Amino acid sequence: MDVLLVGGANNLMNATIDKLNKEGHRIYVLTERRFESTRNRKVFEYYYFSYDSDCLKEVFESVNPQLVLCMGAYDANYDWTDARKESVRFSLGMMNLLTVFAARRRGRFVYLSTEEVYGNTYSVNVTEEEPTSAHGFRAMVFAQLEQQCKNYSQQMGLDVVVLRLDHLYSVPHSAGECTHISAKMCLDGLKNGKISASDRYQISLLHIQDATDFIYQVCACESHQKPLYNLSASHAITQMEIARILCEGLGSGTEVEDNTVGQMNRLVLSNAAFAAEFRQEIRHEPRESLLQIASYMKKHRNTFVSLDKAEDNFRSRFIDRAVSLFWAVLPFAENMICFIPFFMLNNRATDSKYFARLDFYLLYVLLFAIVYGQQQATFSALLAVLGYVFRQSYHRSSFEVMMDYNTYVWMAQLFIVGLVVGYMKDRLNVMQQENRQELHYMENQLDDIEDINTSNARMKNMLVDQIINQSDSLGKIYEVTSRLNKYEPEEVLFYAADIVAKLMGSKDVAIYTIANREYARLYSSTSQQARRLGKSIQYLTMEEMSTALTERRVYINKKLDERYPLMACAIYSEDEMQLILMVWGIPWEHMTLAQADTLIVISDLIQNAVLRANRYLAALEDRRYISGTPIMEEEAFTKLVRAYLTAQTNGLTECALVAIDTRELSIEEAAGRLRGVFRQTDYLGVMSGNLYLLLSNSDENAAGFVLERVRKLEMDAHVQRGIDL
């Protein structure tokens, strides 16, 4: 099944991807964030578009999903800091998704909502029929989207389902994931050593793994009864109990602060509607999960507490600005400090016959032009001019210095050299920055190319597997099942079991025929393991399997219950169940919907061969039986016995051939007496002028009971062995 997930990366999204990938589905993700911090390798393809974009139509056409799972209230792409602004964007995006889905009218749309749509307190568990009581922009837009989904389902006849999750929680891995009540309380305990809690605040916690299992059941089911389901553990727990468990996990140094005031505040969703239609098994109890949350957050205390302290905006802004100011002032301070030794060197060199022609000011300007560029070159040149004028004023007046053309020639030389070198340094810095940006851009391009290559390689490998492993292709399945047409009508069901075993990759397959409305009789099997349920079963008492078969679905034994096969499928003829195919020995990873679809295709193709054989036998019934008796003619009975004995030799069934000595009775009279001896699945016939009884799915030990009954009718009987046909 092709699944389109709509939402940003978070714990719920990742858990859903893992579940769908484990079940063998192909996953596509539509998200608004172009550069995710992590890309899940289990996703077949990512699409980066805004939810209100016109490109969604092309995305849906490209993916052609059978299921659209929208994270909705749990979409990490939305920042609800400004709830009023974000509610408008959320509503537009979700409505565009629904509109595009409605235009295609294909598949199922699942929208995830939250318990926030209820803002009041309730003395009993809240059912789906209870009107919402949302408070605030965020909760109101969630409630409105629930109603819109309901309208699309009822008025347009679309398969749209709303799943309302009750107080979802999981182990957080960063401070940003501390959004649920238990993580927030644990974070308070780490920071302050106290957890404030009320004994009059009751909720129900639903672990993210349990929620994922429940969501998948709704997504994978063939049909459902309601457009809205509450997903909840329906087990009330007080805030005080949560705080005490978290304190136990955090250890000494953390205490509970009783904040019990006011009236009872209770919000627990009822899961009765979901439990009545689907399997609900809570695998994560609140106590164990809360202890895991406390243990993890305590172990990674610095990750949560340090990030929380960094949220002090004033302090962080002050530090950032102080650091920026320091690095901005540092070159000027360094320039002024370095000017002092160069000023002293220049003064000493003026009276020296060796260094008189050496211009230390020029070296000073060049040094800062090379290191810092034009800005510092200009500043250092100004300082050098001031130092030069100050030195010349020792012997003559400042006016004379300023009127000397040599001063201006020296200043021009100083500024020209400094600005040119500084300009070259600045250009070199710009080029290096451009190169770094281009390198960063190319690295991002390389990452995108690697992702595209990974996606293409995955598609190529999938196509290669389909070509190499032809056992999964429809052409190969049809080729194998069409071999049934070469068998005699009496042999079709025997070899059908063997073909199912080969195509399903299992050595244990059984075929049961429906004897009446309650019982099924074993007809053929490929191993002793496949015969473990017995030769006759009351299949209606096997509720889970019979319900699936009655609804014409493939039964998958996900609980690995030993009383049931791992997979089962029924074959119908004119709305009447005729056969049941049962398969054992399937690896857990192959018990997927894809394998179930394969079994459906196989059963449909086998059905054609079985119906053809049955119609052929029905058309020749007058020729196969002696008129007015249940006795088969010699030719028809010989073919049937040969088919059973060959199947027994190949290990596909068990049978026993009983020879009956009618003594002085005619064959017709003997058949009349034997009516109450053999079963509907046994056969009475004539060979070489003698009367025989073929017992299907019976060995020689079971034939002993038949022999005693025949002898009580004043006839002799014995098991015929080594008959030559």
Image (cartoon, rainbow, N blue to C red):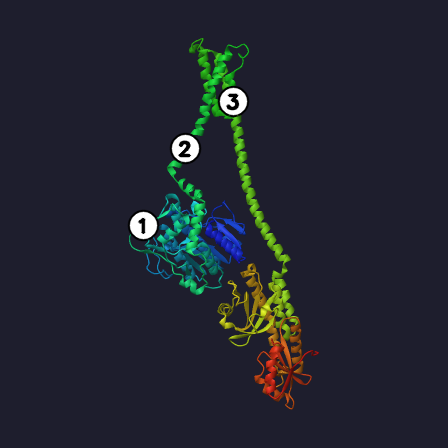
Give the mark count: 3
- Spatial separation of the CA atoms under disc 3 and disc 2: 29 Å
Comparing labels 1 and 3, the label whose residue is closer to the camera: 1
Query: Residue at (53%, 38%) from the top-left corner?
Result: 440
Q: Which corner quadrant holds the C terminus?
A: bottom right
The quadrant holding residue 724 is bottom right
N-term mark: 1 or 3: 1
Query: Which numbered disc covers residue 554?
Result: none
N-term mark: 1 or 2: 1
SS type, badge 2: helix
SS type, badge 1: loop
In this view of the protein, which residue sits in the foreground, 603 or 66?
603
Residue 356, relative to residue 85: is it above or below?
above
Comparing labels 1 and 2, the label whose residue is closer to the camera: 1
SS type, badge 3: helix
Task: Name the spot of residue 110 as percent of width and height, x first.
Answer: 45, 57
Residue 198, relative to residue 619: is it above or below?
above
User: What residue is pinned by disc 1?
Assistant: 259
